[in-house]
Image (cartoon, grey):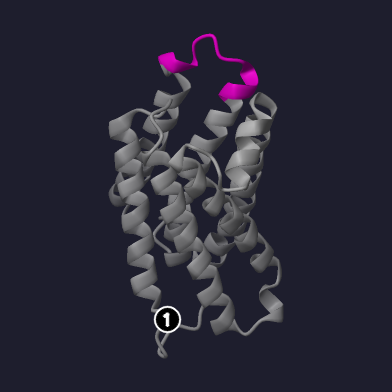
Amino acid sequence: MNSTRTFLIWTALAVAVGVPVFAAATSPLLAWRSPVYIAAGLAGVIAMALMLFQPLLVAGYVPGLPANRARYVHRWVGGTLVAAVVIHVAALWVTSPPDVIDALLFVSPTPFSVWGVIAMWAVFASAGLAMMRRRLRLRVWRRAHTALAVTIVIGSVVHALRIDGTMEPVSKAVLCLLLLLATLKVVVKKQVWTTRARQKP
């Protein structure tokens, strides 16, 4: 891949994730908010941004990274994603424990909470599955991991789109669309649920 194309791809990725994060960090809705509340919101936005890299790393679409290095980075990004989700939920708990309890019990009056909780548990399950990778048959592991990844993406996208919060609407919608398209392309490319699925992780 030539240097110009590499530069353009990295620039596009930087804009796709940097603009929504910057817009959320400078949102006027954060005025007079507590540091814990701000941390909760930004952790959620960063988690969304990190998700975009995961399918790209799996499929080898990130320029400058050979396959073995891309899988290594994929694992580290996954760990960072788990940490961001934990910070997001923990900070929300500090700001309003009853709201978090209602969300976890699926009785919250805000519909977006349900999708966020589903995505959260899928993130944790995916991380747990990653640690069990060598104990399961490759095809079983890949199908389960992919199913959880799709659940994470769909849950997170619906969660984000239904929140009228600090994320700027246009950049948020673009990030969500790119995340959905990248995930769909990789799932189709890998043919995980076919009998001829590729065997490389």
Q: Is residue 33 magenta?
A: yes
Tell me what residue is drawn at x 64 percent, y 56 percent. 124
Quadrant for residue 173, please give it: top left
State which quarter of the image contains the N terminus: bottom left
Tell me what residue is drawn at x 54 percent, y 83 percent. 139
Name the spot of residue 186 as percent of width and height, x first.
Answer: 38, 67
Q: In the rendered view, tell whether residue 60 sits above or below residue 159.
A: below
> Is residue 112 among what the camera can see?
yes
Q: In the rendered view, tell whether residue 188 sits above or below residue 179.
A: below
Tell me what residue is drawn at x 56 percent, y 61 percent. 69
Magenta stretch secondary structure, dominant: helix
Name the spot of residue 7 as percent of width and height, x first.
Answer: 34, 44
Q: Secondary structure at mark 1?
A: loop
Q: Is residue 47 magenta?
A: no
Taking the view exactly as shown, the residue that stands out farthest to the top is 32
Instruction: Identify the residue under disc 1.
Output: 193
Front residue of 146 and 165: 165
Quadrant for residue 35, please give it: top right
Q: In the rendered view, tell whether residue 175 sits above or below residue 92.
A: below
Name the spot of residue 90 as percent of width and height, x first.
Answer: 68, 35
Magenta-highlighted residues: 28-38
Q: In the rendered view, tell whether residue 195 sits above or below residue 159.
A: below
Front residue of 65 and 85: 85
> Is residue 201 among what the camera can see?
no
Front residue of 108 and 63: 108
Classify 10 Å Cα crowding around label 1: few (below 14), some (14-19), many (20 and above).
Answer: some
Name the spot of residue 183 as percent of width and height, x first.
Answer: 38, 60
Tell me what residue is drawn at x 42 percent, y 81 percent. 193
Q: Amino acid at mark 1?
A: Trp
